[in-house]
Amino acid sequence: MSIDFGQSTGINFSLSDDQKKVQLAARDFAENVLAPVVRDADREPDPLKAFQMTKPAYVEAYKRGIAFGMLPKEYGGGGLTNVELILAAEEICAVDPGFACTVLVNGLALLPVWYWGTEEQKRKVLGAATSDATGEYLAGYAAYEAALDWAKTYTAGSPHPMIYFQNVGYVLGDVAARIEACRYFCWKAAHYIDQHEYHGELIGALNKTYCTETLLDSVYKCMQVVGVNSADRKHPFEKLLREAAIFPIYDGGNFGMQRRRIHGVLASPDFNPRALMDDEYVNFTKQMETIDTIQHAEAPQQPLEMA
């Protein structure tokens, strides 16, 4: 994303040519490789068999450089920035949020090795992962588009499609606004992390709590537009609701971790409430991480020190 903070041009949210290539490549993969297998895999009651049904798509994601795009090129990765990674993730989530998690979980396991491992460990572990194509290393957006298509074609016995009814239009308009707000918040967070050596504890926690909880409510709003038909498994809504309900409580739960991190930073006497607006580095300490916990309560009560 070519964000220019110069006085003459202001803020530019247009994507660069390279970023557009990443976005379109991920969209092509999602629509032409992933989409054909998603529904059948979701209907499979055996989770292992369901995973095996999507495994060819995972292998293709590896071949196209998506699976390890977050790692540096020198270790066999794609060398994507966090902004580019967000662009690719959105396209995949539009088809199947669960598969996006399967791909991105590679980063959960491998990024710590890149951050803190020795050079020998990086060559050994990252090299092994990025050279293995077998796959052993292993929402609201989609609901909105499906609900909009439904509203433009379903009449519910009236003379006109449902989109022409005020309430339906208002609800979908609100969802559309939420999607745009969360999209730009994700871009902002990714851009911030790229600028501050992969540190973004505060903005990352703010991003996850707001966007995941907004996503859950937005999916449900879309289901209200469609009505009881949204429970029919021939439509994507019930799958999207299941996945949207999981996002706030996994990968560092919003209450178990993310809000505690936010609280810890905000409670610091040195915290600048305009830091993110000013693109200022926000330090994060162990004391901030343990606020609201027994460990923090038993520690000497003194102002938090910024390292």
Image (cartoon, grey):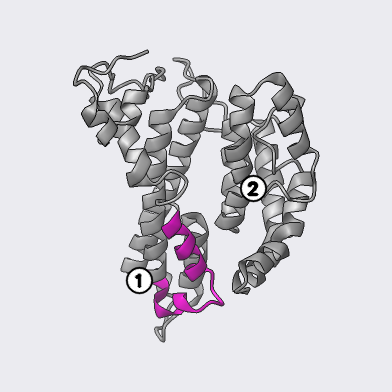
Name which residue lies at 35% across and 71% down. 165
Name which residue lies at 76% across and 24% down. 74
Pick whichever, 112 or 21, lies toward us. 112
Q: Is residue 43 left or right of residue 283?
A: right
Rendered-image quadrant of the C terminus = top left
**Magenta residues?**
224-246
Outermost residue to the left: 301
| Figure label count | 2
Rendered-image quadrant of the N terminus = top right
Vertical side of 236 occupied by 154: above or below: below
Pick whichever, 67 or 276, lies toward us. 67
Q: Amino acid at mark 1?
A: Phe
Residue 146 in view, yes or no: yes
Residue 181 in view, yes or no: no
Vertical side of 275 occupied by 164: above or below: below
Q: Residue 152 location, x and y as percent?
A: 49, 70
> Mark 1 sits on what residue?
165
As for residue 233 lying within the magenta part, the answer is yes
> Mark 2 sits on what residue?
103
As for residue 284 lying within the magenta part, the answer is no
Label 1: how many Cα within 10 Å (few below 14, some 14–19, many 20+)? few
Dividing the picture into quadrants, the one containing residue 72 is top right
